[in-house]
Amino acid sequence: MKLIATALRPEAEPFISKLKLKRDLNVHSHEVFRNEDTALIVTGIGAVRSAIGTTLILERYGSPSSLIMNIGVAAGPETSPCGSMYSIHSISSFTTSYSSFSTSYYPEMVVQTHIPEAALITVENPVSECPNDWPSNTLSDMEGIGFCQAAFTFCNPERILVLKVISDHFSPRSLSRESIRGAILANVDSALSILQSLHEVDRAYSSSPLPAQEENYLHLLAESLKLTTAQRAQLFKHAIRKWALEPKEYHQLRDLVVLPPANSQQRRQSFQQVLDVLSPS
Protein backbone atom coordinates (compact mmCIF):
# COMPACT_ATOMS: atom_id res chain seq x y z
CA MET A 1 0.00 0.00 0.00
CA LYS A 2 1.23 3.48 -0.91
CA LEU A 3 0.39 6.09 1.72
CA ILE A 4 0.28 9.88 1.31
CA ALA A 5 0.07 12.53 4.03
CA THR A 6 -0.73 16.18 3.35
CA ALA A 7 -1.44 18.95 5.82
CA LEU A 8 -4.09 20.78 3.79
CA ARG A 9 -7.03 19.77 1.64
CA PRO A 10 -5.79 21.87 -1.35
CA GLU A 11 -2.53 19.88 -1.22
CA ALA A 12 -4.52 16.64 -1.31
CA GLU A 13 -7.00 17.52 -4.06
CA PRO A 14 -4.67 16.95 -7.06
CA PHE A 15 -3.93 13.42 -5.78
CA ILE A 16 -7.58 12.70 -5.00
CA SER A 17 -8.49 13.68 -8.56
CA LYS A 18 -5.53 12.02 -10.31
CA LEU A 19 -5.86 8.70 -8.46
CA LYS A 20 -9.67 8.78 -8.25
CA LEU A 21 -9.56 8.36 -4.49
CA LYS A 22 -12.82 8.00 -2.57
CA ARG A 23 -13.57 9.21 0.94
CA ASP A 24 -13.27 6.50 3.60
CA LEU A 25 -16.38 7.12 5.66
CA ASN A 26 -15.22 4.70 8.35
CA VAL A 27 -12.69 7.29 9.53
CA HIS A 28 -14.32 10.18 11.37
CA SER A 29 -11.36 12.00 12.93
CA HIS A 30 -9.66 12.91 9.65
CA GLU A 31 -10.35 13.23 5.95
CA VAL A 32 -9.04 9.97 4.47
CA PHE A 33 -9.31 9.01 0.81
CA ARG A 34 -8.32 5.74 -0.80
CA ASN A 35 -8.44 3.31 -3.69
CA GLU A 36 -7.19 -0.26 -3.94
CA ASP A 37 -3.49 0.49 -3.50
CA THR A 38 -3.23 4.07 -2.18
CA ALA A 39 -4.52 5.84 0.93
CA LEU A 40 -4.25 9.59 1.59
CA ILE A 41 -4.84 11.50 4.81
CA VAL A 42 -5.27 15.24 5.40
CA THR A 43 -3.56 15.65 8.77
CA GLY A 44 -4.14 19.32 9.51
CA ILE A 45 -1.58 22.05 10.16
CA GLY A 46 1.28 21.70 12.63
CA ALA A 47 3.76 19.06 13.72
CA VAL A 48 1.53 17.47 16.37
CA ARG A 49 -1.41 17.06 14.01
CA SER A 50 0.90 15.74 11.33
CA ALA A 51 2.30 13.12 13.72
CA ILE A 52 -1.19 12.06 14.82
CA GLY A 53 -2.53 11.80 11.27
CA THR A 54 0.54 9.96 10.01
CA THR A 55 0.29 7.48 12.87
CA LEU A 56 -3.39 6.91 12.07
CA ILE A 57 -2.85 6.12 8.41
CA LEU A 58 0.12 3.86 9.14
CA GLU A 59 -1.73 1.93 11.82
CA ARG A 60 -4.90 1.61 9.76
CA TYR A 61 -3.53 0.93 6.28
CA GLY A 62 0.18 0.31 6.70
CA SER A 63 2.17 -2.91 6.53
CA PRO A 64 5.89 -3.78 6.56
CA SER A 65 5.92 -3.22 2.79
CA SER A 66 4.15 0.15 2.81
CA LEU A 67 5.70 3.29 1.35
CA ILE A 68 4.71 6.66 2.78
CA MET A 69 5.07 10.11 1.24
CA ASN A 70 4.63 13.52 2.80
CA ILE A 71 4.07 16.25 0.25
CA GLY A 72 3.07 19.86 0.68
CA VAL A 73 4.04 23.45 0.18
CA ALA A 74 6.99 25.10 1.88
CA ALA A 75 8.68 28.46 2.06
CA GLY A 76 12.09 28.85 0.52
CA PRO A 77 14.78 31.45 -0.14
CA GLU A 78 14.73 33.65 -3.23
CA THR A 79 17.07 31.21 -4.96
CA SER A 80 14.30 28.57 -4.91
CA PRO A 81 11.76 29.37 -7.66
CA CYS A 82 8.11 29.24 -6.65
CA GLY A 83 6.48 26.10 -8.00
CA SER A 84 9.66 24.03 -7.96
CA MET A 85 9.64 20.70 -6.12
CA TYR A 86 12.42 19.44 -3.87
CA SER A 87 13.31 16.04 -2.48
CA ILE A 88 14.04 16.52 1.22
CA HIS A 89 17.16 14.77 2.51
CA SER A 90 17.06 15.98 6.12
CA ILE A 91 14.31 17.24 8.41
CA SER A 92 14.78 19.08 11.70
CA SER A 93 13.00 21.76 13.71
CA PHE A 94 13.96 25.02 15.37
CA THR A 95 13.03 25.96 18.88
CA THR A 96 10.85 29.04 19.28
CA SER A 97 13.95 31.19 19.64
CA TYR A 98 15.46 29.84 16.38
CA SER A 99 18.60 29.18 18.39
CA SER A 100 18.93 25.38 18.31
CA PHE A 101 17.92 22.35 16.27
CA SER A 102 15.95 19.30 17.31
CA THR A 103 16.81 15.73 16.39
CA SER A 104 17.13 15.39 12.63
CA TYR A 105 15.65 12.71 10.37
CA TYR A 106 17.18 11.48 7.13
CA PRO A 107 14.97 9.75 4.54
CA GLU A 108 17.03 7.56 2.23
CA MET A 109 16.25 8.22 -1.42
CA VAL A 110 16.91 4.94 -3.22
CA VAL A 111 15.88 5.97 -6.73
CA GLN A 112 17.32 8.59 -9.03
CA THR A 113 15.17 11.67 -9.54
CA HIS A 114 15.52 14.75 -11.70
CA ILE A 115 14.50 17.17 -8.96
CA PRO A 116 16.87 19.06 -6.65
CA GLU A 117 17.41 18.16 -3.01
CA ALA A 118 17.10 20.44 0.01
CA ALA A 119 17.01 20.36 3.79
CA LEU A 120 13.80 21.17 5.66
CA ILE A 121 13.27 22.99 8.95
CA THR A 122 9.89 22.71 10.64
CA VAL A 123 8.77 25.78 12.59
CA GLU A 124 5.92 26.39 15.02
CA ASN A 125 4.57 29.46 13.22
CA PRO A 126 4.88 30.72 9.64
CA VAL A 127 8.14 32.55 8.98
CA SER A 128 7.23 35.97 7.58
CA GLU A 129 10.82 37.02 6.98
CA CYS A 130 13.86 34.93 6.18
CA PRO A 131 16.30 35.11 9.15
CA ASN A 132 19.76 36.40 8.33
CA ASP A 133 21.36 33.18 9.55
CA TRP A 134 18.96 30.88 7.71
CA PRO A 135 20.93 27.90 6.31
CA SER A 136 21.45 27.79 2.56
CA ASN A 137 19.41 25.38 0.41
CA THR A 138 16.93 24.97 3.26
CA LEU A 139 13.13 25.16 3.16
CA SER A 140 10.60 25.77 5.92
CA ASP A 141 7.28 24.13 6.76
CA MET A 142 5.13 23.43 9.83
CA GLU A 143 4.59 19.66 9.59
CA GLY A 144 7.69 17.81 8.40
CA ILE A 145 9.16 16.98 11.79
CA GLY A 146 5.86 15.58 13.06
CA PHE A 147 5.45 13.42 9.97
CA CYS A 148 8.96 12.03 10.43
CA GLN A 149 8.52 11.34 14.13
CA ALA A 150 5.63 9.05 13.24
CA ALA A 151 6.90 7.64 9.94
CA PHE A 152 10.32 6.66 11.27
CA THR A 153 8.62 4.80 14.13
CA PHE A 154 6.90 2.48 11.65
CA CYS A 155 9.07 2.49 8.51
CA ASN A 156 12.67 2.12 7.40
CA PRO A 157 14.25 5.31 5.98
CA GLU A 158 14.13 3.99 2.41
CA ARG A 159 10.34 3.66 2.63
CA ILE A 160 9.87 7.32 3.56
CA LEU A 161 9.64 10.11 0.99
CA VAL A 162 9.33 13.82 1.74
CA LEU A 163 8.66 16.22 -1.15
CA LYS A 164 8.10 19.96 -0.81
CA VAL A 165 6.91 22.48 -3.39
CA ILE A 166 7.97 26.11 -3.02
CA SER A 167 4.90 28.27 -2.48
CA ASP A 168 6.47 31.53 -1.30
CA HIS A 169 9.68 33.23 -0.26
CA PHE A 170 8.80 33.59 3.42
CA SER A 171 5.68 35.61 2.65
CA PRO A 172 2.84 33.35 3.88
CA ARG A 173 0.22 36.10 3.56
CA SER A 174 0.45 35.77 -0.21
CA LEU A 175 -0.86 32.19 -0.10
CA SER A 176 -4.36 31.21 -1.09
CA ARG A 177 -6.21 27.95 -1.46
CA GLU A 178 -5.94 28.25 -5.23
CA SER A 179 -2.21 28.99 -5.25
CA ILE A 180 -1.49 26.04 -2.95
CA ARG A 181 -3.56 23.66 -5.06
CA GLY A 182 -1.95 24.97 -8.24
CA ALA A 183 1.57 24.48 -6.90
CA ILE A 184 0.87 20.84 -6.04
CA LEU A 185 -1.11 20.20 -9.23
CA ALA A 186 1.86 21.26 -11.35
CA ASN A 187 4.00 18.61 -9.63
CA VAL A 188 1.53 15.78 -9.01
CA ASP A 189 2.73 13.65 -11.93
CA SER A 190 6.38 13.96 -10.91
CA ALA A 191 5.59 13.13 -7.29
CA LEU A 192 3.58 10.04 -8.23
CA SER A 193 6.31 8.95 -10.64
CA ILE A 194 8.89 9.04 -7.84
CA LEU A 195 6.56 7.14 -5.51
CA GLN A 196 5.93 4.53 -8.21
CA SER A 197 9.68 4.15 -8.80
CA LEU A 198 10.14 3.40 -5.11
CA HIS A 199 7.34 0.86 -5.33
CA GLU A 200 8.97 -0.86 -8.32
CA VAL A 201 12.33 -1.06 -6.53
CA ASP A 202 10.61 -2.65 -3.55
CA ARG A 203 8.64 -5.05 -5.76
CA ALA A 204 11.81 -6.14 -7.58
CA TYR A 205 13.32 -7.00 -4.23
CA SER A 206 10.29 -8.82 -2.83
CA SER A 207 9.42 -10.99 -5.88
CA SER A 208 12.00 -13.49 -7.14
CA PRO A 209 11.89 -16.72 -9.20
CA LEU A 210 14.91 -18.11 -7.35
CA PRO A 211 14.53 -21.38 -5.43
CA ALA A 212 13.49 -20.87 -1.83
CA GLN A 213 16.87 -22.05 -0.55
CA GLU A 214 18.69 -19.43 -2.61
CA GLU A 215 16.21 -16.71 -1.66
CA ASN A 216 16.82 -17.49 2.01
CA TYR A 217 20.58 -17.32 1.50
CA LEU A 218 20.32 -13.95 -0.24
CA HIS A 219 18.10 -12.61 2.55
CA LEU A 220 20.69 -13.71 5.13
CA LEU A 221 23.47 -12.15 3.06
CA ALA A 222 21.53 -8.89 2.75
CA GLU A 223 20.91 -8.81 6.50
CA SER A 224 24.57 -9.54 7.24
CA LEU A 225 25.68 -6.68 5.00
CA LYS A 226 22.90 -4.37 6.25
CA LEU A 227 21.89 -3.55 2.67
CA THR A 228 19.38 -0.84 1.86
CA THR A 229 16.20 -1.66 -0.05
CA ALA A 230 17.78 -0.42 -3.30
CA GLN A 231 20.89 -2.54 -2.74
CA ARG A 232 18.73 -5.58 -1.96
CA ALA A 233 16.84 -5.04 -5.20
CA GLN A 234 20.15 -4.83 -7.05
CA LEU A 235 21.38 -8.00 -5.33
CA PHE A 236 18.29 -9.98 -6.34
CA LYS A 237 18.35 -8.60 -9.88
CA HIS A 238 21.95 -9.75 -10.38
CA ALA A 239 21.28 -13.09 -8.68
CA ILE A 240 18.21 -13.85 -10.81
CA ARG A 241 20.10 -13.07 -14.01
CA LYS A 242 23.10 -15.17 -12.95
CA TRP A 243 20.86 -18.09 -11.93
CA ALA A 244 19.06 -18.02 -15.28
CA LEU A 245 22.12 -17.66 -17.52
CA GLU A 246 24.99 -19.26 -15.61
CA PRO A 247 23.61 -21.51 -12.84
CA LYS A 248 26.92 -23.33 -12.30
CA GLU A 249 28.87 -20.10 -11.85
CA TYR A 250 26.11 -18.75 -9.59
CA HIS A 251 27.17 -21.17 -6.85
CA GLN A 252 30.51 -19.37 -6.57
CA LEU A 253 28.57 -16.95 -4.41
CA ARG A 254 28.49 -19.59 -1.69
CA ASP A 255 32.31 -19.69 -1.65
CA LEU A 256 32.59 -15.97 -1.02
CA VAL A 257 33.43 -15.11 2.59
CA VAL A 258 31.64 -11.89 3.52
CA LEU A 259 32.04 -10.49 7.02
CA PRO A 260 29.53 -8.08 8.59
CA PRO A 261 30.74 -4.55 7.78
CA ALA A 262 31.93 -2.23 10.52
CA ASN A 263 31.02 0.91 8.57
CA SER A 264 29.37 2.08 5.36
CA GLN A 265 32.64 1.98 3.41
CA GLN A 266 33.17 -1.68 4.27
CA ARG A 267 29.54 -2.38 3.35
CA ARG A 268 30.04 -0.86 -0.10
CA GLN A 269 33.26 -2.84 -0.62
CA SER A 270 31.71 -6.15 0.46
CA PHE A 271 28.61 -5.51 -1.62
CA GLN A 272 30.74 -4.80 -4.68
CA GLN A 273 32.54 -8.15 -4.13
CA VAL A 274 29.17 -9.89 -4.22
CA LEU A 275 28.10 -8.06 -7.39
CA ASP A 276 31.40 -8.97 -9.06
CA VAL A 277 30.71 -12.67 -8.44
CA LEU A 278 27.19 -12.30 -9.85
CA SER A 279 28.28 -10.36 -12.95
CA PRO A 280 28.21 -12.17 -16.32
CA SER A 281 31.35 -14.19 -17.04
Image (cartoon, helix red, strand yellow):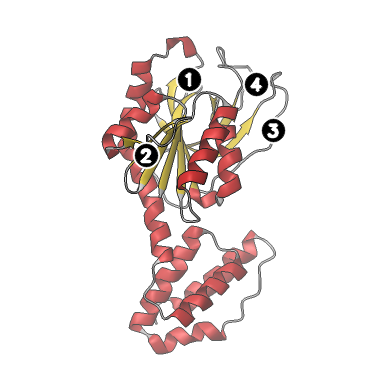
Q: Identify residue type, mark 1.
A: Glu
Of pointers 1 and 2, the one earlier in the residue sequence:
1
Under circle 1, the secondary element is: loop
Of pointers 3 and 1, the one earlier in the residue sequence:
1
Residue 83 spot, x, y in % from top left: 37, 25
Give the residue drawn at x 66%, y 67%. 261
Q: Identify residue type, mark 2.
A: Ala
Q: Nearer the viewer's eye, disc 4 or disc 2? A: 2
Which label belongs to residue 191?
A: 2
Query: Could you give the CA–CA distance between mark 4 and mark 2, rounded to whole angstroms?
Result: 31 Å
Query: Could you give the CA–CA distance between mark 1 and mark 2, rounded to whole angstroms?
Result: 23 Å
Q: Is 52 situated left or right of 236 in this image? A: right
Answer whether labels 4 and 3 touch (C-beta < 8 Å): no
Residue position for label 1: 78
Q: Quadrant of the C terminus?
A: bottom left
Query: Could you give the CA–CA distance between mark 3 and mark 1, rounded to whole angstroms?
Result: 25 Å
Residue 232 spot, x, y in % from top left: 49, 65
Which of the two residues, 152 or 23, is positioned nearer the viewer here? 23
Under circle 4, the secondary element is: loop
Which label belongs to residue 102?
A: 3
Query: Could you give the CA–CA distance between mark 4 and mark 3, rounded to whole angstroms?
Result: 17 Å
Under circle 2, the secondary element is: helix
Of pointers 4 and 3, the one earlier in the residue sequence:
3
Q: Is residue 83 above or below residue 247?
A: above
Query: Could you give the CA–CA distance between mark 4 and mark 1, rounded to whole angstroms?
Result: 14 Å
Answer whether labels 4 and 2 touch (C-beta < 8 Å): no
Residue position for label 4: 133
Which of the two residues, 180 or 248, is positioned nearer the viewer here? 180
